[in-house]
Amino acid sequence: MTGLAAAAAAIGVGEAVAAFTGPGTAPVYAVGSAAIDLTPTPLKEYAIRTFGTDDKPVLLGGIHLTMALLAVLAGLLALHRPVLGAAVLVLFGGVGVRAALSRPGATLVDAAPAVAAGVAGACTLFLLARLLRAAAAPRTADTRTDAADHPGSPATTSHGGEPAHQPTGVTGRRTLLVATGGTIAFAASTGFGGRALSDSRNDIVAVRAAVRLPPPTAPLPPLPAAVHPAVPGLSSFTTPNSDFYRVDTALTLPRIDPRHWALRIHGMVDHPLLLTFDDLLHLPLEELDHTLSCVSNEVGGHYVGTTRWLGASLPALLRRAGVKPGADQLVGRSQDGMTIGTPLESVLDGRRALLAVAMNGEVLPVAHGFPCRTVVPGFYGYTSATKWLVDLNVTTFAAYEPYWVRRGWDRRGEVRTASRIEVPAPFARVPAGDVTVAGTAWATHRGIAAVELRVDGGPWQTAQPAADAGPDLWRQWTHTWSGATPGTHRIEVRAADASGAVQTEQRAAPYPAGATGWHSTVVTVT
Protein backbone atom coordinates (compact mmCIF):
# COMPACT_ATOMS: atom_id res chain seq x y z
CA MET A 1 0.00 0.00 0.00
CA THR A 2 2.87 2.38 0.73
CA GLY A 3 4.17 1.98 -2.81
CA LEU A 4 0.76 2.72 -4.33
CA ALA A 5 0.32 5.76 -2.10
CA ALA A 6 3.74 7.08 -3.11
CA ALA A 7 2.97 6.52 -6.80
CA ALA A 8 -0.34 8.35 -6.39
CA ALA A 9 1.52 11.26 -4.82
CA ALA A 10 3.91 11.28 -7.76
CA ILE A 11 1.06 11.41 -10.28
CA GLY A 12 -0.74 14.12 -8.31
CA VAL A 13 2.32 16.35 -8.07
CA GLY A 14 3.06 15.78 -11.75
CA GLU A 15 -0.47 16.87 -12.69
CA ALA A 16 -0.17 19.97 -10.50
CA VAL A 17 3.07 21.09 -12.13
CA ALA A 18 1.67 20.28 -15.60
CA ALA A 19 -1.03 22.88 -14.98
CA PHE A 20 1.71 25.44 -15.68
CA THR A 21 3.64 23.61 -18.41
CA GLY A 22 0.74 22.13 -20.41
CA PRO A 23 -1.53 19.10 -19.91
CA GLY A 24 0.47 16.99 -22.36
CA THR A 25 3.59 17.29 -20.17
CA ALA A 26 2.02 15.41 -17.25
CA PRO A 27 4.16 12.26 -16.80
CA VAL A 28 1.49 9.71 -17.68
CA TYR A 29 0.51 11.57 -20.86
CA ALA A 30 4.12 12.21 -21.84
CA VAL A 31 4.95 8.51 -21.44
CA GLY A 32 1.79 7.58 -23.33
CA SER A 33 2.66 9.85 -26.25
CA ALA A 34 6.16 8.41 -26.42
CA ALA A 35 4.70 4.89 -26.30
CA ILE A 36 2.49 5.69 -29.30
CA ASP A 37 5.50 6.94 -31.24
CA LEU A 38 7.51 3.82 -30.40
CA THR A 39 4.74 1.28 -30.98
CA PRO A 40 5.30 -0.80 -34.15
CA THR A 41 2.79 -0.07 -36.91
CA PRO A 42 1.19 -3.57 -36.89
CA LEU A 43 0.49 -3.19 -33.17
CA LYS A 44 -1.05 0.25 -33.75
CA GLU A 45 -3.30 -1.19 -36.43
CA TYR A 46 -4.29 -4.02 -34.08
CA ALA A 47 -5.20 -1.47 -31.39
CA ILE A 48 -7.34 0.53 -33.81
CA ARG A 49 -9.08 -2.61 -35.10
CA THR A 50 -9.67 -3.99 -31.62
CA PHE A 51 -10.46 -0.91 -29.57
CA GLY A 52 -11.44 1.65 -32.20
CA THR A 53 -11.65 5.17 -30.79
CA ASP A 54 -11.18 3.71 -27.27
CA ASP A 55 -7.54 2.88 -28.04
CA LYS A 56 -6.23 5.89 -26.11
CA PRO A 57 -8.11 5.14 -22.85
CA VAL A 58 -6.88 1.56 -23.12
CA LEU A 59 -3.29 2.79 -23.52
CA LEU A 60 -3.58 5.14 -20.53
CA GLY A 61 -5.14 2.35 -18.49
CA GLY A 62 -2.20 0.12 -19.35
CA ILE A 63 0.27 2.80 -18.27
CA HIS A 64 -1.51 3.28 -14.96
CA LEU A 65 -1.60 -0.50 -14.42
CA THR A 66 2.13 -0.78 -15.20
CA MET A 67 2.90 2.02 -12.78
CA ALA A 68 0.75 0.36 -10.11
CA LEU A 69 2.73 -2.87 -10.47
CA LEU A 70 6.01 -0.97 -10.27
CA ALA A 71 4.70 0.88 -7.21
CA VAL A 72 3.88 -2.40 -5.46
CA LEU A 73 7.39 -3.63 -6.26
CA ALA A 74 8.86 -0.37 -4.97
CA GLY A 75 6.88 -0.70 -1.75
CA LEU A 76 8.13 -4.24 -1.15
CA LEU A 77 11.72 -3.22 -1.82
CA ALA A 78 11.43 -0.18 0.43
CA LEU A 79 10.49 -2.33 3.45
CA HIS A 80 14.06 -3.62 3.63
CA ARG A 81 15.95 -1.33 1.22
CA PRO A 82 14.28 2.13 1.30
CA VAL A 83 16.76 3.68 -1.08
CA LEU A 84 16.24 0.91 -3.63
CA GLY A 85 12.46 1.24 -3.41
CA ALA A 86 12.63 5.01 -3.86
CA ALA A 87 14.92 4.50 -6.83
CA VAL A 88 12.12 2.67 -8.67
CA LEU A 89 9.94 5.80 -8.53
CA VAL A 90 12.89 7.99 -9.46
CA LEU A 91 13.33 5.72 -12.47
CA PHE A 92 9.70 6.25 -13.47
CA GLY A 93 10.26 9.98 -13.19
CA GLY A 94 13.32 9.59 -15.41
CA VAL A 95 11.23 7.77 -18.01
CA GLY A 96 8.79 10.68 -17.89
CA VAL A 97 11.61 13.18 -18.40
CA ARG A 98 12.91 11.24 -21.39
CA ALA A 99 9.41 10.98 -22.85
CA ALA A 100 8.65 14.69 -22.37
CA LEU A 101 11.91 15.78 -23.99
CA SER A 102 11.41 13.40 -26.92
CA ARG A 103 8.42 15.38 -28.20
CA PRO A 104 9.06 17.71 -31.15
CA GLY A 105 9.73 21.25 -29.99
CA ALA A 106 10.12 20.21 -26.34
CA THR A 107 12.10 22.36 -23.90
CA LEU A 108 13.58 21.66 -20.49
CA VAL A 109 10.48 23.20 -18.91
CA ASP A 110 8.41 20.32 -20.31
CA ALA A 111 10.39 17.91 -18.13
CA ALA A 112 9.47 19.74 -14.90
CA PRO A 113 6.32 17.67 -14.13
CA ALA A 114 8.22 14.38 -14.45
CA VAL A 115 11.10 15.66 -12.31
CA ALA A 116 8.68 16.84 -9.63
CA ALA A 117 6.77 13.54 -9.80
CA GLY A 118 9.92 11.45 -9.40
CA VAL A 119 11.17 13.47 -6.43
CA ALA A 120 7.76 13.52 -4.74
CA GLY A 121 7.21 9.79 -5.22
CA ALA A 122 10.67 8.83 -3.98
CA CYS A 123 10.53 11.07 -0.88
CA THR A 124 7.02 9.93 -0.01
CA LEU A 125 7.93 6.26 -0.32
CA PHE A 126 11.08 6.75 1.76
CA LEU A 127 9.10 8.35 4.60
CA LEU A 128 6.24 5.85 4.45
CA ALA A 129 8.73 2.98 4.45
CA ARG A 130 10.28 4.27 7.67
CA LEU A 131 6.85 4.36 9.29
CA LEU A 132 6.11 0.87 8.00
CA ARG A 133 9.31 -0.53 9.47
CA ALA A 134 8.58 1.19 12.78
CA ALA A 135 5.08 -0.30 12.84
CA ALA A 136 6.40 -3.76 12.05
CA ALA A 137 9.21 -3.64 14.65
CA PRO A 138 8.66 -5.87 17.78
CA ARG A 139 8.14 -4.19 21.15
CA THR A 140 11.21 -4.03 23.38
CA ALA A 141 11.90 -6.63 26.02
CA ASP A 142 11.68 -4.00 28.82
CA THR A 143 8.15 -3.10 27.82
CA ARG A 144 7.04 -6.74 27.88
CA THR A 145 8.75 -7.36 31.27
CA ASP A 146 7.24 -4.33 32.95
CA ALA A 147 3.79 -5.31 31.75
CA ALA A 148 4.21 -8.85 33.16
CA ASP A 149 5.85 -8.03 36.52
CA HIS A 150 3.77 -4.99 37.39
CA PRO A 151 0.36 -5.50 35.83
CA GLY A 152 -1.19 -2.78 37.93
CA SER A 153 1.60 -0.26 37.74
CA PRO A 154 0.92 3.34 36.66
CA ALA A 155 2.95 2.68 33.59
CA THR A 156 0.29 0.33 32.17
CA THR A 157 -3.02 1.41 33.69
CA SER A 158 -4.72 4.65 34.48
CA HIS A 159 -6.84 5.44 37.50
CA GLY A 160 -9.88 4.32 35.55
CA GLY A 161 -8.38 0.94 34.75
CA GLU A 162 -7.79 1.80 31.03
CA PRO A 163 -4.37 1.59 29.40
CA ALA A 164 -2.39 4.75 29.95
CA HIS A 165 -0.71 4.36 26.52
CA GLN A 166 -0.81 1.97 23.60
CA PRO A 167 2.07 -0.38 22.82
CA THR A 168 4.58 1.00 20.36
CA GLY A 169 3.51 -1.34 17.52
CA VAL A 170 -0.15 -0.27 17.72
CA THR A 171 0.78 3.40 17.77
CA GLY A 172 3.11 2.88 14.80
CA ARG A 173 0.41 1.15 12.76
CA ARG A 174 -2.02 3.98 13.46
CA THR A 175 0.57 6.53 12.44
CA LEU A 176 1.25 4.58 9.25
CA LEU A 177 -2.45 4.33 8.39
CA VAL A 178 -2.97 8.04 8.99
CA ALA A 179 0.11 8.93 6.93
CA THR A 180 -0.90 6.60 4.08
CA GLY A 181 -4.48 7.87 4.04
CA GLY A 182 -3.25 11.45 4.16
CA THR A 183 -0.90 10.76 1.25
CA ILE A 184 -3.70 9.33 -0.86
CA ALA A 185 -5.96 12.27 -0.02
CA PHE A 186 -3.15 14.67 -0.90
CA ALA A 187 -2.53 12.84 -4.17
CA ALA A 188 -6.20 12.97 -5.15
CA SER A 189 -6.65 16.62 -4.29
CA THR A 190 -3.41 17.62 -5.97
CA GLY A 191 -4.06 15.57 -9.08
CA PHE A 192 -7.64 16.64 -9.61
CA GLY A 193 -6.82 20.18 -8.55
CA GLY A 194 -3.93 20.32 -11.00
CA ARG A 195 -6.11 19.04 -13.83
CA ALA A 196 -8.86 21.53 -12.96
CA LEU A 197 -6.32 24.36 -12.83
CA SER A 198 -4.94 23.26 -16.18
CA ASP A 199 -8.44 23.28 -17.66
CA SER A 200 -9.13 26.75 -16.28
CA ARG A 201 -5.81 28.09 -17.54
CA ASN A 202 -6.51 26.59 -20.96
CA ASP A 203 -10.27 27.13 -21.17
CA ILE A 204 -10.63 26.95 -24.91
CA VAL A 205 -14.39 26.36 -24.82
CA ALA A 206 -15.23 29.99 -24.10
CA VAL A 207 -12.58 31.26 -26.53
CA ARG A 208 -13.91 29.02 -29.31
CA ALA A 209 -17.49 30.09 -28.62
CA ALA A 210 -16.45 33.74 -29.05
CA VAL A 211 -15.13 33.20 -32.59
CA ARG A 212 -17.30 34.85 -35.24
CA LEU A 213 -16.79 33.47 -38.72
CA PRO A 214 -17.35 35.66 -41.77
CA PRO A 215 -19.61 34.22 -44.48
CA PRO A 216 -18.09 32.53 -47.53
CA THR A 217 -17.46 34.73 -50.51
CA ALA A 218 -19.55 32.43 -52.72
CA PRO A 219 -21.78 30.14 -50.61
CA LEU A 220 -22.46 26.69 -51.99
CA PRO A 221 -26.12 25.79 -52.51
CA PRO A 222 -27.62 23.18 -50.18
CA LEU A 223 -27.04 19.62 -51.27
CA PRO A 224 -30.07 18.27 -53.16
CA ALA A 225 -32.30 15.83 -51.31
CA ALA A 226 -31.73 13.31 -54.10
CA VAL A 227 -28.19 12.58 -52.86
CA HIS A 228 -29.63 10.62 -49.93
CA PRO A 229 -32.10 7.75 -50.54
CA ALA A 230 -34.81 7.59 -47.89
CA VAL A 231 -33.86 4.14 -46.61
CA PRO A 232 -34.05 3.51 -42.84
CA GLY A 233 -30.64 2.53 -41.51
CA LEU A 234 -28.63 4.23 -44.26
CA SER A 235 -25.99 6.72 -43.08
CA SER A 236 -26.90 10.38 -43.34
CA PHE A 237 -25.25 11.95 -46.36
CA THR A 238 -23.62 14.70 -44.30
CA THR A 239 -21.98 13.43 -41.12
CA PRO A 240 -22.83 15.41 -37.96
CA ASN A 241 -19.76 16.85 -36.27
CA SER A 242 -20.48 14.80 -33.15
CA ASP A 243 -20.36 11.58 -35.22
CA PHE A 244 -17.36 12.45 -37.37
CA TYR A 245 -14.59 9.93 -36.82
CA ARG A 246 -11.40 10.87 -34.99
CA VAL A 247 -8.18 8.89 -35.41
CA ASP A 248 -4.94 10.57 -34.30
CA THR A 249 -2.09 10.16 -31.83
CA ALA A 250 -3.04 13.00 -29.45
CA LEU A 251 -3.66 11.77 -25.89
CA THR A 252 -4.60 15.29 -24.80
CA LEU A 253 -6.27 17.60 -27.29
CA PRO A 254 -4.15 20.67 -28.10
CA ARG A 255 -5.81 23.79 -26.75
CA ILE A 256 -4.87 26.68 -28.97
CA ASP A 257 -6.04 30.21 -28.30
CA PRO A 258 -6.64 31.70 -31.76
CA ARG A 259 -5.64 35.12 -30.43
CA HIS A 260 -2.12 33.74 -30.00
CA TRP A 261 -2.13 31.40 -33.00
CA ALA A 262 0.01 31.97 -36.08
CA LEU A 263 0.70 29.92 -39.19
CA ARG A 264 4.15 30.02 -40.77
CA ILE A 265 4.51 29.15 -44.48
CA HIS A 266 8.17 28.71 -45.32
CA GLY A 267 10.76 26.47 -46.94
CA MET A 268 11.14 26.46 -50.73
CA VAL A 269 9.20 29.67 -51.26
CA ASP A 270 10.14 33.14 -52.48
CA HIS A 271 8.14 35.01 -49.86
CA PRO A 272 7.67 33.27 -46.48
CA LEU A 273 4.36 34.13 -44.83
CA LEU A 274 3.21 34.46 -41.23
CA LEU A 275 -0.56 34.57 -40.79
CA THR A 276 -2.53 35.30 -37.64
CA PHE A 277 -6.05 33.97 -37.14
CA ASP A 278 -7.45 37.42 -37.93
CA ASP A 279 -5.40 37.45 -41.15
CA LEU A 280 -6.89 34.08 -42.06
CA LEU A 281 -10.47 35.19 -41.43
CA HIS A 282 -9.95 38.31 -43.56
CA LEU A 283 -9.01 36.19 -46.58
CA PRO A 284 -11.75 35.13 -49.01
CA LEU A 285 -13.33 32.04 -47.46
CA GLU A 286 -14.57 29.15 -49.58
CA GLU A 287 -16.88 26.20 -48.91
CA LEU A 288 -15.97 22.65 -49.86
CA ASP A 289 -18.15 19.55 -49.65
CA HIS A 290 -15.75 16.69 -49.11
CA THR A 291 -15.61 13.08 -47.92
CA LEU A 292 -12.62 12.39 -45.67
CA SER A 293 -11.51 8.85 -44.83
CA CYS A 294 -8.82 7.28 -42.67
CA VAL A 295 -6.22 4.92 -44.10
CA SER A 296 -6.81 2.64 -41.09
CA ASN A 297 -10.38 2.02 -42.25
CA GLU A 298 -11.06 -1.66 -42.81
CA VAL A 299 -13.21 -2.83 -45.71
CA GLY A 300 -16.75 -1.77 -44.80
CA GLY A 301 -15.50 0.32 -41.88
CA HIS A 302 -16.81 3.58 -40.46
CA TYR A 303 -13.70 5.77 -40.34
CA VAL A 304 -15.11 7.98 -43.08
CA GLY A 305 -17.38 11.00 -43.07
CA THR A 306 -18.68 13.85 -45.20
CA THR A 307 -18.86 17.47 -44.19
CA ARG A 308 -19.07 20.98 -45.61
CA TRP A 309 -15.80 22.70 -44.81
CA LEU A 310 -15.17 26.45 -44.72
CA GLY A 311 -11.72 27.93 -45.09
CA ALA A 312 -9.16 29.93 -47.03
CA SER A 313 -7.75 28.65 -50.30
CA LEU A 314 -4.50 26.80 -49.66
CA PRO A 315 -3.38 26.94 -53.32
CA ALA A 316 -3.89 30.71 -53.34
CA LEU A 317 -1.67 31.15 -50.30
CA LEU A 318 1.06 28.94 -51.76
CA ARG A 319 1.03 30.93 -54.98
CA ARG A 320 1.24 34.11 -52.95
CA ALA A 321 4.30 32.70 -51.17
CA GLY A 322 5.81 31.69 -54.52
CA VAL A 323 6.74 28.00 -54.68
CA LYS A 324 10.27 27.42 -55.95
CA PRO A 325 11.05 24.89 -58.71
CA GLY A 326 11.88 21.40 -57.45
CA ALA A 327 9.54 21.42 -54.45
CA ASP A 328 7.24 18.38 -54.44
CA GLN A 329 5.95 18.02 -50.88
CA LEU A 330 3.96 20.21 -48.51
CA VAL A 331 4.53 19.25 -44.87
CA GLY A 332 2.02 20.43 -42.30
CA ARG A 333 2.99 20.38 -38.63
CA SER A 334 0.54 20.24 -35.77
CA GLN A 335 1.07 22.03 -32.47
CA ASP A 336 1.66 18.62 -30.86
CA GLY A 337 4.46 17.85 -33.33
CA MET A 338 2.59 15.57 -35.74
CA THR A 339 3.76 16.01 -39.36
CA ILE A 340 1.63 15.30 -42.44
CA GLY A 341 3.12 15.31 -45.95
CA THR A 342 0.99 16.03 -49.04
CA PRO A 343 2.11 15.76 -52.69
CA LEU A 344 2.54 19.41 -53.65
CA GLU A 345 1.47 19.05 -57.28
CA SER A 346 -1.91 17.78 -56.08
CA VAL A 347 -2.47 20.88 -53.98
CA LEU A 348 -1.72 23.09 -56.98
CA ASP A 349 -3.50 21.09 -59.73
CA GLY A 350 -6.80 22.94 -59.49
CA ARG A 351 -8.56 21.05 -56.71
CA ARG A 352 -10.05 23.09 -53.89
CA ALA A 353 -7.74 22.52 -50.94
CA LEU A 354 -8.44 24.55 -47.81
CA LEU A 355 -7.04 25.89 -44.60
CA ALA A 356 -10.31 25.01 -42.89
CA VAL A 357 -11.72 26.93 -39.93
CA ALA A 358 -15.22 25.42 -39.81
CA MET A 359 -17.17 22.25 -40.58
CA ASN A 360 -20.91 22.00 -41.16
CA GLY A 361 -21.36 25.70 -40.38
CA GLU A 362 -19.70 25.42 -36.97
CA VAL A 363 -16.29 26.61 -35.81
CA LEU A 364 -13.94 23.63 -35.94
CA PRO A 365 -14.40 21.45 -32.85
CA VAL A 366 -11.24 21.12 -30.76
CA ALA A 367 -11.13 17.38 -31.50
CA HIS A 368 -11.07 18.14 -35.23
CA GLY A 369 -8.34 20.73 -35.33
CA PHE A 370 -9.47 24.08 -33.90
CA PRO A 371 -8.52 26.71 -34.87
CA CYS A 372 -7.19 25.57 -38.27
CA ARG A 373 -6.55 22.39 -40.24
CA THR A 374 -5.76 21.39 -43.81
CA VAL A 375 -8.19 19.63 -46.15
CA VAL A 376 -6.94 18.28 -49.49
CA PRO A 377 -9.39 16.11 -51.48
CA GLY A 378 -8.22 12.81 -52.90
CA PHE A 379 -6.03 11.65 -50.02
CA TYR A 380 -6.42 9.79 -46.78
CA GLY A 381 -6.20 11.94 -43.67
CA TYR A 382 -2.65 10.86 -42.87
CA THR A 383 -1.34 12.67 -45.98
CA SER A 384 -3.80 15.54 -46.26
CA ALA A 385 -5.41 16.58 -42.98
CA THR A 386 -3.14 18.28 -40.46
CA LYS A 387 -5.18 19.18 -37.39
CA TRP A 388 -4.12 21.98 -34.99
CA LEU A 389 -1.97 23.33 -37.82
CA VAL A 390 0.82 25.79 -36.96
CA ASP A 391 3.40 25.31 -39.73
CA LEU A 392 3.54 24.59 -43.48
CA ASN A 393 6.91 23.69 -44.95
CA VAL A 394 7.35 23.58 -48.73
CA THR A 395 10.01 20.93 -49.28
CA THR A 396 10.73 17.66 -51.09
CA PHE A 397 10.07 14.00 -50.37
CA ALA A 398 13.80 13.38 -50.58
CA ALA A 399 14.54 15.98 -47.91
CA TYR A 400 11.92 15.06 -45.33
CA GLU A 401 9.85 12.03 -44.30
CA PRO A 402 6.71 12.88 -42.30
CA TYR A 403 5.57 10.94 -39.23
CA TRP A 404 3.63 8.15 -40.95
CA VAL A 405 6.00 7.77 -43.92
CA ARG A 406 8.85 7.13 -41.47
CA ARG A 407 6.74 4.26 -40.16
CA GLY A 408 6.38 2.60 -43.54
CA TRP A 409 3.11 4.02 -44.86
CA ASP A 410 2.78 4.96 -48.53
CA ARG A 411 4.06 8.49 -49.04
CA ARG A 412 1.16 9.62 -51.26
CA GLY A 413 -1.85 8.10 -49.53
CA GLU A 414 -4.35 8.39 -52.37
CA VAL A 415 -7.82 7.16 -51.48
CA ARG A 416 -8.72 3.76 -52.89
CA THR A 417 -12.16 3.04 -54.30
CA ALA A 418 -14.38 1.65 -51.53
CA SER A 419 -17.99 0.59 -51.08
CA ARG A 420 -20.00 -0.86 -48.23
CA ILE A 421 -23.42 -2.39 -47.55
CA GLU A 422 -25.28 -0.68 -44.72
CA VAL A 423 -28.80 -2.07 -45.22
CA PRO A 424 -29.58 -4.82 -44.29
CA ALA A 425 -27.33 -4.83 -41.27
CA PRO A 426 -24.97 -7.80 -40.83
CA PHE A 427 -26.80 -10.99 -39.73
CA ALA A 428 -30.16 -9.25 -40.09
CA ARG A 429 -33.32 -11.31 -40.54
CA VAL A 430 -35.44 -10.09 -43.45
CA PRO A 431 -38.74 -11.36 -44.90
CA ALA A 432 -38.76 -13.29 -48.15
CA GLY A 433 -39.64 -11.45 -51.33
CA ASP A 434 -38.27 -8.08 -52.36
CA VAL A 435 -35.49 -6.84 -50.05
CA THR A 436 -34.04 -3.32 -50.14
CA VAL A 437 -30.25 -3.21 -50.13
CA ALA A 438 -28.48 0.14 -49.70
CA GLY A 439 -25.07 1.55 -48.95
CA THR A 440 -22.35 4.05 -49.73
CA ALA A 441 -19.34 4.17 -52.07
CA TRP A 442 -16.48 6.64 -52.45
CA ALA A 443 -13.41 7.32 -54.57
CA THR A 444 -12.50 10.80 -53.40
CA HIS A 445 -11.59 13.28 -56.14
CA ARG A 446 -12.32 10.67 -58.82
CA GLY A 447 -15.98 10.10 -58.08
CA ILE A 448 -18.18 7.00 -58.29
CA ALA A 449 -19.64 6.04 -61.67
CA ALA A 450 -21.34 2.73 -60.86
CA VAL A 451 -22.11 0.27 -58.07
CA GLU A 452 -22.86 -3.42 -58.51
CA LEU A 453 -23.84 -6.21 -56.13
CA ARG A 454 -24.42 -9.91 -56.24
CA VAL A 455 -26.01 -12.53 -54.04
CA ASP A 456 -24.38 -15.89 -53.24
CA GLY A 457 -21.75 -15.44 -55.95
CA GLY A 458 -24.35 -15.05 -58.72
CA PRO A 459 -24.30 -12.56 -61.57
CA TRP A 460 -23.51 -8.92 -60.81
CA GLN A 461 -26.51 -6.60 -60.84
CA THR A 462 -26.37 -2.83 -61.25
CA ALA A 463 -27.49 -0.81 -58.24
CA GLN A 464 -29.31 2.48 -58.52
CA PRO A 465 -26.92 5.29 -57.55
CA ALA A 466 -28.32 8.37 -55.86
CA ALA A 467 -27.70 11.82 -57.33
CA ASP A 468 -24.01 12.61 -57.84
CA ALA A 469 -22.95 15.53 -55.62
CA GLY A 470 -19.45 15.70 -57.10
CA PRO A 471 -16.18 13.76 -57.30
CA ASP A 472 -15.00 14.85 -53.84
CA LEU A 473 -18.02 13.26 -52.15
CA TRP A 474 -19.23 9.77 -51.51
CA ARG A 475 -22.24 8.43 -53.41
CA GLN A 476 -25.07 6.45 -51.90
CA TRP A 477 -26.97 3.72 -53.71
CA THR A 478 -29.93 1.35 -53.46
CA HIS A 479 -30.98 -1.94 -55.00
CA THR A 480 -34.07 -4.11 -54.83
CA TRP A 481 -33.18 -7.74 -54.35
CA SER A 482 -36.14 -9.43 -55.99
CA GLY A 483 -37.44 -12.80 -54.96
CA ALA A 484 -35.25 -13.38 -51.92
CA THR A 485 -35.80 -16.98 -50.81
CA PRO A 486 -35.65 -18.34 -47.25
CA GLY A 487 -32.23 -19.26 -45.98
CA THR A 488 -28.85 -17.68 -45.30
CA HIS A 489 -27.42 -15.53 -48.09
CA ARG A 490 -24.25 -13.54 -48.72
CA ILE A 491 -24.41 -10.16 -50.46
CA GLU A 492 -21.30 -8.58 -51.98
CA VAL A 493 -20.76 -5.08 -53.39
CA ARG A 494 -18.17 -3.41 -55.61
CA ALA A 495 -17.89 0.05 -57.19
CA ALA A 496 -16.25 1.65 -60.21
CA ASP A 497 -14.76 5.12 -60.16
CA ALA A 498 -15.35 7.78 -62.81
CA SER A 499 -12.43 6.47 -64.89
CA GLY A 500 -14.15 3.09 -65.16
CA ALA A 501 -11.64 1.30 -62.91
CA VAL A 502 -13.48 -1.38 -60.91
CA GLN A 503 -12.77 -1.92 -57.22
CA THR A 504 -10.45 -4.89 -56.79
CA GLU A 505 -11.58 -8.10 -55.16
CA GLN A 506 -8.14 -8.78 -53.68
CA ARG A 507 -8.14 -8.31 -49.94
CA ALA A 508 -5.41 -6.16 -48.42
CA ALA A 509 -4.98 -4.79 -44.92
CA PRO A 510 -4.91 -1.01 -44.37
CA TYR A 511 -1.11 -1.01 -44.01
CA PRO A 512 0.69 0.40 -45.95
CA ALA A 513 -1.60 2.09 -48.51
CA GLY A 514 -5.22 1.48 -47.52
CA ALA A 515 -7.49 -1.56 -47.39
CA THR A 516 -8.86 -3.19 -50.53
CA GLY A 517 -11.45 -5.89 -51.24
CA TRP A 518 -15.19 -6.24 -51.66
CA HIS A 519 -17.43 -5.71 -48.68
CA SER A 520 -20.00 -8.40 -47.96
CA THR A 521 -22.72 -9.08 -45.44
CA VAL A 522 -24.65 -12.19 -44.45
CA VAL A 523 -28.42 -12.08 -43.89
CA THR A 524 -31.10 -14.62 -43.10
CA VAL A 525 -34.28 -14.56 -45.18
CA THR A 526 -37.31 -15.87 -43.29
Image (cartoon, helix red, strand yellow):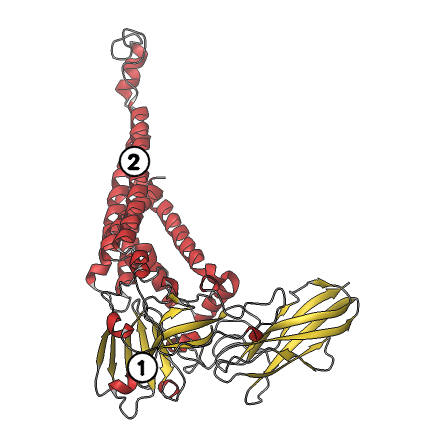
Q: Position of residue 59 (x, y in %)?
A: 42, 58
Crowd rating for badge 1 (residues with CA inside 10 Å; few <14, some 14–19, many 20+): some
Q: Quadrant of the C terminus?
A: bottom right
Using the rendered view, name the quadrant where residue 250 is placed.
bottom left
The CA span between labels 2 and 1 is 52 Å
Q: Position of residue 290 (x, y in %)?
A: 46, 76
Query: What label does residue 525 carry, if any?
Result: none
Looking at the image, residue 2 lies above or below residue 230: above
Res 365 seen here: yes
Query: What label does residue 400 carry, if any?
Result: 1
Instruction: Tell me the residue at 28%/42% (across/down).
Output: 125
Under mark 2, the amino acid is: Gly
Q: Position of residue 384 (x, y in %)?
A: 39, 77
Q: Label 2: which residue?
A: 182
Depth check, front residue: 407 or 131 = 407
In the image, 292: left or right of 347?
right
Secondary structure under the numbered disc 2 in the rendered image = helix
Crowd rating for badge 2 (residues with CA inside 10 Å; few <14, some 14–19, many 20+): few
Looking at the image, residue 189 lies above or below residue 170: below
